[in-house]
Image (cartoon, grey):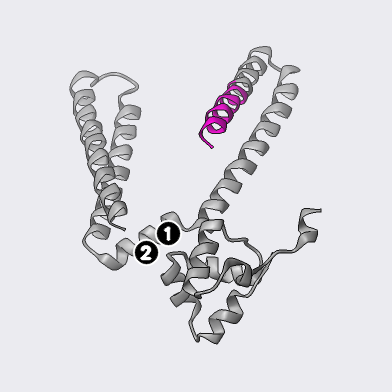
Amino acid sequence: MQNRIQELRKQRRVTQQELADALSVSRQTIISLENGRYNASLLLAHRIAQYFETTIEAIFIFDEEETL
Amino acid sequence: MKNYAARLKRRNLIDGIFAAAALTAMVVFRITMKEAESFNMLQGFCTGFAVVLIIRIIRNAQCLHNEELLRKKYIASTDERTLAIEREVSTTTLRISMLVLGITTVITSFVSESTAYTLAAVLGIITLLQFILYAVYNRRM
């Protein structure tokens, strides 16, 4: 699963710490999400989408090969 | 966050009760078991238990009086990546422990039958517990 969190965050000139504070998660979680090492839960994905005022599908790119 | 603060207050109250119980037990042991061999061990256990709880109470109380500390503690205890890591660690630890217990049981059976039976019983209890908990969470989720 790929995501556009880093891209959206940089567009809005938000630091990782600011984003982490807004989402009530640790900065390490944001780093792992941006690097693709950790996949957000549905709840966190929803919060991220709300923060960036967009949809979950616009942020998280589902890779169909992962299910094969 | 208000719910978390209330939870911390409740936890502090419970910790306080247990700490008081441990300190009371220590006094009771001191009065009743002066000459007993197990006195030192029991006293050590009660003291350690009480100290750990008191430290936790102080830390929680500091967080309850400081909004920033409370927020940090809240994030540390609810961060989903940290919780996912903890779940993964628990699962892996259990699997490795059971594997080691199984191997040790087989090896020990050549040396001491009673020890092998004890280890097998421990392995059996863990497996049984796993089945029970699986059934419980299967119903909950």
**Label 2's element?**
helix
For image coordinates 30% across by 33% down, the residue present is: B46
Whether residue A9 is situated above or below residue A33 in the rendered picture: below
Q: Choose top left, top right, bottom left or bottom right for residue B102.
A: top right
> What residue do we see at 59% from left, 26% from top?
B126
Circle 1 chain? B
Marks 1 and 2 on same chain: yes
Q: Nearer the viewer, residue B24 or B13?
A: B13
Separation (CA) of disc 1 from disc 2: 6 Å
Q: In this view, does A51 lie above or below A14?
A: above
Q: Name the residue under label 1.
A: B76
Q: Is residue B75 above or below residue B132?
A: below
Q: Where is residue B140 in the image (x, y as percent from the top left)?
A: 51, 34
Along the line of sight, which residue is nearer the eye, B75 or B98?
B75
> Where, quadrant-wise, is the N terminus of chain A in this rendering?
bottom right
Q: Tell me the tag on residue B72.
A: 2
For residue A35, the mark is none
Please state which amino acid type lies under the numbered disc 2: Lys
Which chain is disc 2 placed on?
B
Q: Tell me whether the residue at label 1 lies in contact with that at label 2, contact meaning CB atoms closer than 8 angstroms.
A: yes
Where disc 1 sits, the SS reads: helix
Q: Which region is colored magenta?
A: B125-141
Residue A50 is one of the magenta-drawn residues: no
In screen coordinates, is B131 left or right of A18? right
| Residue B13 % position (x, y) | 22, 41
